Image: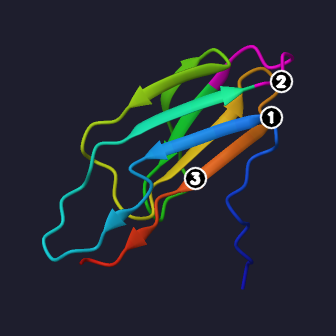
Amino acid sequence: EPSVAPQVSPANVIFTVTPDAIKQCPGAEPVSTEVSWLVADMAVTEVKVEVANAGQSSRKLLSLAGRQGKATTEAWVVVGTKFYLTDYKTGQELSSFEMPSQPCN
């Protein structure tokens, strides 16, 4: 059984997804999110933000931008949706975030 890596970022990367959890209520609809990032490492000039649907490994490009920015999704994000922040030049993954659930109350 593969171990799940914790969702951590290097000290020089801030990667946030808002909201940062989705309530698991009956009839809950997918949500729109805002993804923002700041990469302090000056060697990183461009980053790409990619998204993978829950349970899938194939990624789709959400944004290609500079070291700091933000992008907004439509209302299609569900529990398990994964976001990846990658150095465009080197392909190195800088950070990732998987949308967790929170109790409905």
Is residue 87 within the magenta segment? Answer: no
**Res. 39 image quadrant:** top right
Residue pictured at 73% horizontal, 36% vertical: 13
- Magenta span main SS: loop
Magenta extent: 40-47
Tell which circle, 2 or 1, labels the residue nearer the N-terminal end: 1
Q: How far is the residue under mark 3 from the one under mark 1? A: 16 Å
10 Å neighbourhood of mark 1: few (<14), some, or many (≥20)? few
Residue pictured at 48% horizontal, 45% vertical: 17
Quadrant location of the C terminus in the rendered image: bottom left
Q: Which mark is residue 97?
A: 3
Q: What amino acid does circle 1 point to?
A: Asn
Q: Which residue is mark 1?
A: 12
Q: Which residue is mark 2?
A: 41
Callout 1: SS: loop
> Horizontal and vertical percent for residue 78?
34, 59
10 Å neighbourhood of mark 3: few (<14), some, or many (≥20)? many
Callout 2: SS: loop
Task: Please say if the residues under marks 2 and 1 sit with CB atoms less than 8 Å apart.
Answer: yes
> Horizontal and vertical percent for residue 47?
66, 24
Q: Is residue 55 left or right of residue 88?
A: left
10 Å neighbourhood of mark 2: few (<14), some, or many (≥20)? few
Task: Please say if the residues under marks 3 and 1 sit with CB atoms less than 8 Å apart.
Answer: no
Q: What amino acid does circle 3 point to?
A: Phe
Tell which of 87 and 70 is nearer to you.
70
Vertical order, 17 against 56 (above or below): above
Q: How far is the residue under mark 2 from the one under mark 1? A: 6 Å
Q: What amino acid does circle 2 point to?
A: Asp
Q: How far is the residue under mark 2 from the one under mark 3? A: 20 Å
Tell which circle, 3 or 1, labels the residue nearer the N-terminal end: 1
